[in-house]
Amino acid sequence: MPAASAADLLTWYDRHRRALPWRALPGVRPDPYRVWLSEVMLQQTTVTAVKPYFEKFLTLFPTVQALAAAPEEAVMSAWAGLGYYSRARNLHACAKAVAAAGRFPDTEEGLRKLPGIGAYTAGAIAAIAFDRPAAAVDGNVERVMTRLHAIETPLPAARAQIRLLTQGMVPHDRPGDFAQAVMDLGATLCTPKRPACALCPWMRPCRARSEGLQDTFPRKVKKEKGTLRKGAAFVALRAGDEAVLLRTRPSEGLLGAMAEPPGSPWLPDYDPAKGLLDAPLDARWKRLPGVVKHGFTHFPLELTVFFARVAAGTVAPDGMRFTPREKLDEEPLPGAMKKVLAHALAGPVPVAAVAPPPVREPDLATPPEPEPVKRRGPIPKPPSLRPSDLGRVVKKAPKPR
Ligand code: SF4
């Protein structure tokens, strides 16, 4: 069996390279800012999802200095919807470090010292932006290499071996192109299912293909999905200015510094029937039918949503704010919270209250069953959330009884 050669792959790449917004044209020196921005965005996210965000960031923050100087809220807001929000915080911190230093470090070691830059990203930036002979091993590259060499060790234990094998193939004359070529091969031909081996420049040296086992690599240890957590979210809509009650999550931890409608803790044994004990203010809360489901990396979440219209002029509790519906797009709302708002606001909602409700304790007596839909009037303004967000709401709502 012949050895896989970088030259064969580069010949294929010169003909079939993907045109990507962050990729420099042949012969053009790559811009480290664009390379870094795209690599951070592409961590755990698809090319298709990243493209509009990449364009938006370049428009809002055309240079690393502009990004460094932007308020954190503006960065988080531009990132909202891309997920893994610690990346956005690290992106901002990294931009500040680079702006303070005056330029990006041009070695893997230097890059690794920056916030949010791990082994893969450092290798990718060093190779693509600075032509350093670095290995950039992401999921695509892992798949290609485990197949090419038929590596039986399951991931993640096989990573050190994959890295060594990849590093050993990096050509000194075109390391950046090699890194991008392996990524492209993994994304376009050596796909997770039914790889197009007949078109592959490494078809002959590929061990997995020769054994007809290409679909079975990389070997993986089965992941635990995590324990289901439950909680309640409270969407209060203020009459008059149609503003929604929001708060900002603590800056550390899951969804740090992101916006959300107030809610309960998320716990495996949370009882939504007692959800009103966690209500942020006194109002006629109605439990909406169904639940909002969201999958985080380590656990699935189910939120029961309570909705209330509150009187015009209602003051937000300490640490919270009312944001007009048409400005919700400017809030750094993560995907899970967009689903909550869509669940509460996208459909018909109760007619606006015009008089302040009497002061009273939370309405614990309100039965948890869904309110009949026909009693709700149309909402006066269209939802301000993007249709794509609204369409992603996943609910299996029980039929009103
Ligand atoms: S021959 Fe098939 S399995 Fe092997 S690297 Fe190429 S596309 Fe992947």
Image (spheres, rainbow, N blue to C red):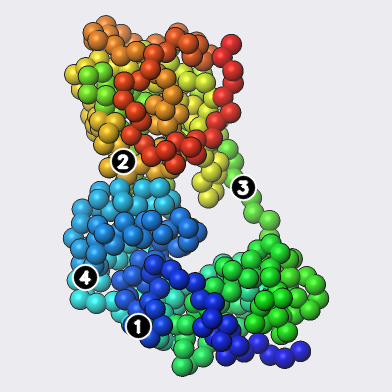
SS type, badge 4: helix
Where is residue 177? Give x, y as percent: 47, 82
Please name the residue that numbered disc 3 is placed on.
225
SS type, badge 2: helix
Q: What residue do we see at 36% from left, 36% from top? A: 385
Residue type at numbered disc 3: Lys
Q: What residue do we see at 75% from left, 80% from top? A: 207
Left or right: 140 with respect to 355?
right
Viewport quadrant of the N terminus? bottom right
Q: What residue do we see at 25% from left, 67% from top? A: 64
SS type, badge 1: loop
The numbered mark, 1 or 2, whose residue comes first in the sequence reads 1
Q: Does residue 276 lie above or below 22 as drawn?
A: above
- Residue 358 placement: quadrant: top left
Where is residue 324? Give x, y as percent: 25, 30
Left or right: 331 with respect to 304?
left
- Check if mark 3's residue and mark 1's residue have beta carbons within 8 Å: no
SS type, badge 3: loop
In this view, the residue in front, 287 or 348, is: 348
Please name the residue that numbered disc 1 is placed on.
28
Please name the residue that numbered disc 2 is placed on.
329
Residue type at numbered disc 4: Ala
- Residue 312 placement: quadrant: top left
